[in-house]
Amino acid sequence: MGTICAYPKFTQVPFKEENLWNSYAEETTAPYGLAKKMMLVQSQAYRQQYGFNSIFLLPVNLCVSRDNFDPFCPHVIPALIKKCCDAISEGENKIRVRGTGKATRKFIYVEDAAEGIVLATEEYNKGEPVNIGSGFEISIKDLVPIIIKLTGYKGAVIRDKSKPDGQPRRCLNTSNSEKEFWFKAVHDFEDGLRKTIKWFAKEGSKLSV
């Protein structure tokens, strides 16, 4: 499993697999992204030298329960959910959100991602990487009010523009996953958010972040 963070910072949108090596990754996630790209190199080397059936998938950001809900980490969905839910439970009337909100992301619900991985392992046997994602791209600015609505938070939002936005856009071209192993995400984005929020409301107090 690779990561969308492996793509160059300024990749032509939507990201195509053949552009993976065009330039350096976005600085804030480059160490992680480059480490993942080395897994691709290893995968291709094993295939070439030993005929090893190894494939490499590049997923977009996940919407998933049991994620890292630390509000100071870069996982935007769980961080926002926790900020809103904590503010409600603690009677706070404002939350602080990192960055300008201009950056965009694609998200995929975990059940769709799992289905894509299973299909790929069963049906795909090539050395070229393949993107896994949904057809839905959204800015962080537009994501925040959706999570506010779904959690029921009523307070203000303060943007901390001193914090980095990260990669300006993250939007994958997923035509190869549909062509090679007939994968297409089916879950509605807001339904995935509702499931994640419901899980956090029940289990969040047990987490240590």
Image (spheres, rainbow, N blue to C red):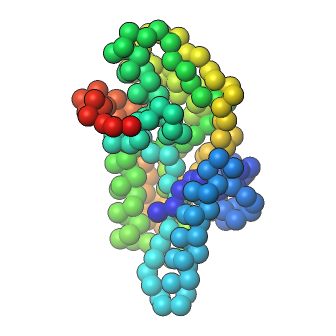
Q: Nearer the viewer, residue 122 or 100?
A: 100
Find residue 24 and report its horizontal and vertical position in percent: 73, 58
Please state, as top left, top right, bottom left or bottom right, where the C terminus lies in the image.
top left
**Residue 28 appears left or right of 131:** right
Which residue is pictured at 55% across the width and 63% down the height? Answer: 36
Where is residue 68, by image quadrant? top left
| Residue 75, above or below 114 | above
Q: For the image shown, how many numbered marks are present on the structure?
A: 0
Which residue is pictured at 54% across the width and 77% down the height? Answer: 42
Where is residue 150, by image quadrant? top left
Find residue 15 and report its horizontal and vertical position in percent: 65, 53
| Residue 208, above or below 32 | above
| Residue 96, above or below 115 | above
Query: Taking the image as drawn, is residue 195 in sight?
Result: no
Q: Nearer the viewer, residue 158 or 117?
A: 158
| Residue 114, above or below 206 | below
Find residue 79 and report its horizontal and vertical position in percent: 46, 32
Q: Nearer the viewer, residue 60 or 166?
A: 166
Which residue is pictured at 66% across the width and 62% down the height? Answer: 20
Find residue 190 and report its horizontal and vertical position in percent: 41, 30
Query: Taking the image as drawn, is residue 140 in sight?
Result: yes
Q: Nearer the viewer, residue 126 or 79?
A: 79
Which residue is pictured at 50% across the width and 46% down the height? Answer: 61
Residue furthest bottom as drawn = 50
Residue furthest front as drawn = 208
